[in-house]
Amino acid sequence: MTAHAPAKPVDRFGTHRVVEPHGALPQAALRLDATPVAFENEILCDVEALNIDSASFTQMREACSDDPKAIGELISATVRERGKQHNPVTGSGGMFVGRVREIGERLRSSIALKPGDRIASLVSLTLTPLHLEEILDVDLETARVSVRGTAVLFESAGWSKLPGDLDDRVALAVLDVAGAPAQVSRLCKPGMSVLVIGAAGKSGILSCAQAKHRVGESGRVIAVVHSAASGGAAILRKAGLANTVAEADARDATALASRVASLLPEGADLVINCVNCPGTESASILCAKEGGTIYFFSMATSFTAAALGAEGLGKDVTMIVGSGYAPNHARIALETLRSHPAILAYFTDVYGTKK
Ligand code: NAP
């Protein structure tokens, strides 16, 4: 039995939870009603942790001078004001991990989930009604925020039961960026040249692994890393996830483009942008070949900068907005991890539960 009736008729996308503006869908809404009840087509969860999107967390770290307490207060304020963790500066969110508390009566017989199951959300926190009682810990290294609170998943929302064979924190880190390896898998073809920018991060490493597998021996993967000395860069080299690992600052478009031109004179067939900072659209466009494709997975991407940048450079490229969803994305991301022991060991070391 649900405890309350919604103010408006429920729909699968959750518009009944939108407080303002009238007519908006939850992602675009300024404010959601995060009342912790499960209406007939919703799943109510007790939230254990938020995995904050990397672009959002980087922005909050800067705004709060790396003070975990201040970041926690900023998150509390955003959630209090908006009913969701929707960073007003970057516009991005993240995902949560938690335990199912209640399933609305209309969903009970149609989903393979029961109260008590532990799940990770596969939709953004920018559209997830969230109510926080307490912030317990902010981990600066992993962007994981331990909390006490509740979240609501709509009928249309994706979720994944936490896999039994992986550390929860590792699974969460991978599921957070699950869209990237799945999209890369379907964009790459044998023989292609692929450039991954921000290759040493979570989505970058998984994207390189997928790209290397898909382009085969006749193709080429170039991984652009911010620092060649980083742990992520070491894994790319050790596990052979790229033909070349190149150090560059992607905000310096001309320097990166000339570095890439020395490796791929015509540019890359496919550029995957996985950075967590703004200002890398031009570099991505310059590094793509004429008629090539750019997949902007980065949430720090500006549509205006990408569109006007391509226009100004007179470059005919296909630019893809990095939706976090692709069919079977959770399965593809977890399989990418399981089939690469070196990546699994690295993710366990960096994101896993500290013993
Ligand atoms: P991550 O693990 O933090 O990795 C980001 C990488 O970008 C790091 O290796 C970082 O290197 C590198 N980088 C930062 N500035 C750079 C620069 N100027 N030049 C070259 N490399 C640079 O991030 P993630 O979790 O993989 O996420 C990557 C991006 O995807 C973020 O923007 C995130 O918000 C976004 N995202 C999108 C979706 C979606 O649905 N589209 C979902 C989740 C996340 P250093 O650490 O050495 O600086």
Image (cartoon, rainbow, N blue to C red):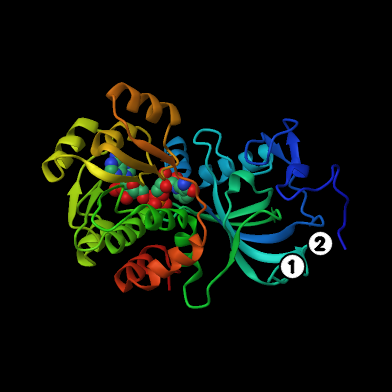
Q: Residue furthest bottom?
A: 165
182, 247: nearer the viewer: 182
Is 330 placed above or below 325 here? below
* Viewport quadrant of the N terminus: bottom right
Is 272 placed above or below 168 here? above
- Residue under the image location 72 percent in, 30 percent down: 21
Q: Is residue 288 left or right of residue 90?
A: left
Q: Which mark is residue 106?
A: 2
Q: Is residue 29 left or right of residue 52?
A: right
34, 242: nearer the viewer: 242
Please, what is the three-letter code of the amino acid marked with disc 1?
Ser
Q: Which residue is mark 1?
A: 110
Tell me where residue 7 sits by quadrant.
Answer: top right
Please, what is the three-letter code of the amino acid marked with disc 2?
Arg
Q: Is residue 198 left or right of residue 46?
A: left
| CB atoms of marks 2 and 1 within 8 Å | yes
- Residue under the image location 19 percent in, 36 percent down: 257
Is 40 placed above or below 128 here? below
